[in-house]
Every structure is written in C-alpha cells, then in structure tokens.
Amino acid sequence: QVQLQESGPGLVKPSQTLSLTCTVSGGSITTGSYYWNWVRQPAGKGLEWIGRIHTSGSTNYNPSLKSRVTISVDTSKNQFSLRLSSVTAGDTAVYYCARLQGGFYYFGYWGQGTLVTVSS
Amino acid sequence: EIVLTQSPGTLSLSPGDRATLSCRASQSVSSSYLAWYQQKPGQAPRLFIYGASTRATGIPDRFSGSGSGTDFTLTISRLEPEDFTVYYCQLYGTFFGQGTKLEIK
C-alpha cells in the first residue's frame, strides 16, 4: 500500500521560501506511470493544484504560481519536494502531496496534509 | 484554462434521499479525465470516481458518476449519514471545482 507523508516547517515568514518534502513509502517513486503532485487548500476553501513532476524530470506548474514554484524529485530517497518563494499570508494553507495516475489523471493517493502558516 | 463549476454550492437533504451533484466544464472535455473526490473535515480528499463513471476501489455502489462533454454528475442513490460532507470534481489532474457541500436537512 502506497503511503505519502509531507514534512517541513509549519511556520514561514513573509517573503521567505516555503519548503516541503513528500516521502513515498510502499513503492518506488520511479515505478509506474505516475506523476507526483502538490495541492493546497486554504482553511475553509477549495483545492488548488500547485504543480507536478514526473521521475523523468518533466514538470508542470499552475500558471498562477509558476513564477514562484519549483518541484524536484530525489529518487534515491523516494521523495519529491516543493519550494514556493516570496510567500505571503495568502499562501497559508494545508499542503498535500498526491500521486497522479497517468492515463486517467486522477489522484489515487494523498498524504495527510500539513498546515503551513505564513506569518511574522 | 478550463473552469469547473459545481452546483449547487450546498445541498440539503435527508438520509435515504437521492443526491445529484453537478460539475460543468467551461469547454467540452474528455470524460476519461473527470474524477470526483469526497473530503471529510480534517482529512485529505479521497478518490471516489474516475473516468467520469468508474468507482474507485472500495466505493459503495450507491455512488455513481455519469456525463460527457461539459456536463457531469455524481449521484448518490440513497444517502447514508457518512455521506454528508464535501465533494469535488477534478479534471486532467489540474483543475478542481469549488466543491459541493452535502448537509443534513
């Protein structure tokens, strides 16, 4: 059974860079037709896709965040990571990592989510 | 950019009722890439339907999905107490609807 677990600081100062890591267990991050994604959800609001990476290295980002987002993968650690620069209070949200099934493009597995608060 | 509009925003029904949730795309899309998720408070979303009509593993058969083109529907044939929560549609692993909250009347 695949499991995903987010980790990283819960508090980030405005203008700084938010960094999160998603550790994948129960299967290799390089196996199968999957894309590894970040999705966020501000409190009481809906879901927003941030971006994704394939283990080939190809990435896709939400155009509204593209200038500030970098997603990378470390296959040796079975992890992928998110960096979001120049954060503001508007970036405060629960951040989820999720596995996207190639072909049908659905999120079959999610991490439990981690709350990141942007505040001085 | 494709916009997914879910309606209604909130649906008030009673256990045992039939629920019909709508997801409308701003342009015609392939049904192969339309998915539905259930999200309970404090939890990650859970995949319920993919390919517009295929139930994910472990999802009860009272849940069904249908639709094509721009209009898609999630139907819950007979509501159970645990079904009252929020549902999202999603397309191409990129676009999400704003959600429909199913509440007890």
Image (cartoon, rainbow, N blue to C red):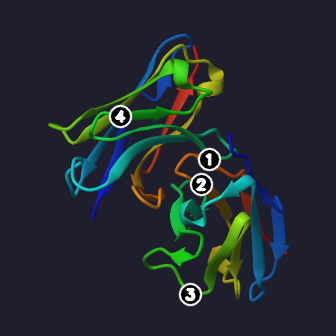
Instruction: Sort mark 1 into few (<14), some (14-19) or many (20+) by Cα contacts within 10 Å.
Output: some
Could you tell me if residue B84 is visible in this image?
A: no
- Whether callout 1 and callout 2 share a subunit is answered yes
Instruction: Please tell me the numbered disc located at residue B82.
Output: none
- Residue at the (34%, 52%) spot, across then down: A34
* Residue denoted by label 4: A58
Instruction: Name the kind of residue labelled 2 in the image.
Output: Leu
Instruction: Sort mark 3 into few (<14), some (14-19) or many (20+) by Cα contacts within 10 Å.
Output: few
Q: Residue A57, relative to residue A109: is it above or below?
A: above
Instruction: Name the kind of residue labelled 1 in the image.
Output: Phe
Identify the subunit bearing mark 4: A
Q: Quadrant of residue B64?
A: bottom right
- Residue at the (54%, 70%) spot, across then down: B48
* Residue denoted by label 3: B61
Q: Pointer 1 and pointer 2: residues touching (CB < 8 Å)? A: yes
Instruction: Please tell me the numbered disc located at residue B95.
Output: 1
Separation of marks 3 and 4 at Cα, in angstroms: 37 Å
Q: Earlier in the sequence, mark 3 or mark 1?
A: 3
- Camera-side mark, 3 or 4: 4
